Amino acid sequence: MWQSSLKENTAEAYSNYINKVASQEIYGDYIGKAETRFKMLNQSTPVDAEDFEQIKTAVDGFFVGISTKSHKILSEHLAPVVVRYNNQSNLSSEQITGQLLLQASKEGAESLRLEAELLNLKYELLQNGNYDVNVPIKKIFESNGGTVSEIKGYIVHLKLTLYRGSLIKINCEQMTIAIVSTYIIYGIRINITI
């Protein structure tokens, strides 16, 4: 049951797992993980259609940049300083872009895509006007022999800042971030818990 929930990687799948544990249909070895993942993917606030579309565009662009190993596309979606990335703090977008491109190149596959499952994206508008975004992704890679493999079960946590009109600066965790695109990603946490 846990493997199928992980493979589906949606709030509904984790909710079903939690409910089956509660009704004692299954033992529930992964109840803590299921509860955490449900909270990350459950949209608990009303969705604003315009914001949702812009957030999806930014998130999709970010993962297209990684998948195509495009420095230009990644740069369009990262803030000049990324507050947090894989337990590192206050890295420049150039450092993050370099790390992401290096990780993509090291996969040893002819092609690698990180595909955001945008229909299952969850976001929350924070009091400071920023957005917390959780998006399930799947990793798709093709070996040199043509074999295509797909791994689901990843959830990426992003923080986005809205830009309306002119160039603005936002103080985030004691640092100033210049906003240069419609939505800009200033923090990334990749949870790889399978």
Image (spheres, rainbow, N blue to C red):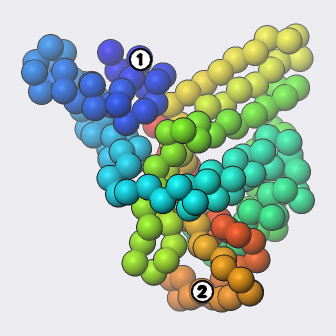
- Residue lying furthest front: 49
Residue at the image position 80 percent from the left and 64 percent from the top: 76
Disc number placed over residue 4 in the picture, else none:
1
- Asked if one can make out residue 138 in the rendered structure from this viewpoint, the answer is yes
User: Whole-percent x and y of residue 38?
Assistant: 33, 40
Kindly indicate the quadrant of the structure image that contains residue 53: bottom right
- Residue lying furthest left: 23
Q: Secondary structure at mark 1?
A: helix
Query: Eyeballing the image, is 110 above or below 96?
Result: above
Kindly indicate the quadrant of the structure image that contains residue 83: bottom right
* Residue marked by disc 2: 170
- Asked if one can make out residue 192 in the rendered structure from this viewpoint, the answer is no
Query: Eyeballing the image, is 150 above or below 59?
Result: above
User: Whole-percent x and y of residue 57?
Assistant: 69, 53
- Looking at the picture, which amino acid does disc 2 mark? Ile
Q: Residue 167 versus residue 72: which sits nearer the camera? A: 167
Query: Eyeballing the image, is 169 above or below 85?
Result: below
Number of residues whose C-alpha sits closer than 10 Å to that of mark 2, classed few (under 14), some (14–19) or many (20 or more): some
First of labels 2, 1 by sequence position: 1
Quadrant where the N terminus is found in the figure: top left
Whether the residues at callouts 2 and 1 have beta carbons within 8 Å, the answer is no
Q: Indicate left or right for 59 with 47 as reference.
A: right
User: Whole-percent x and y of residue 123?
Assistant: 46, 56
User: Whole-percent x and y of residue 129?
Assistant: 49, 77
- Looking at the picture, which amino acid does disc 1 mark? Ser
Q: Indicate left or right for 163 with 5 as reference.
A: right
Residue at the image position 79 percent from the left and 11 percent from the top: 147
Q: Secondary structure at mark 2?
A: strand
Q: Residue 105 versus residue 72: which sits nearer the camera? A: 72
Residue at the image position 79 percent from the left and 32 percent from the top: 112
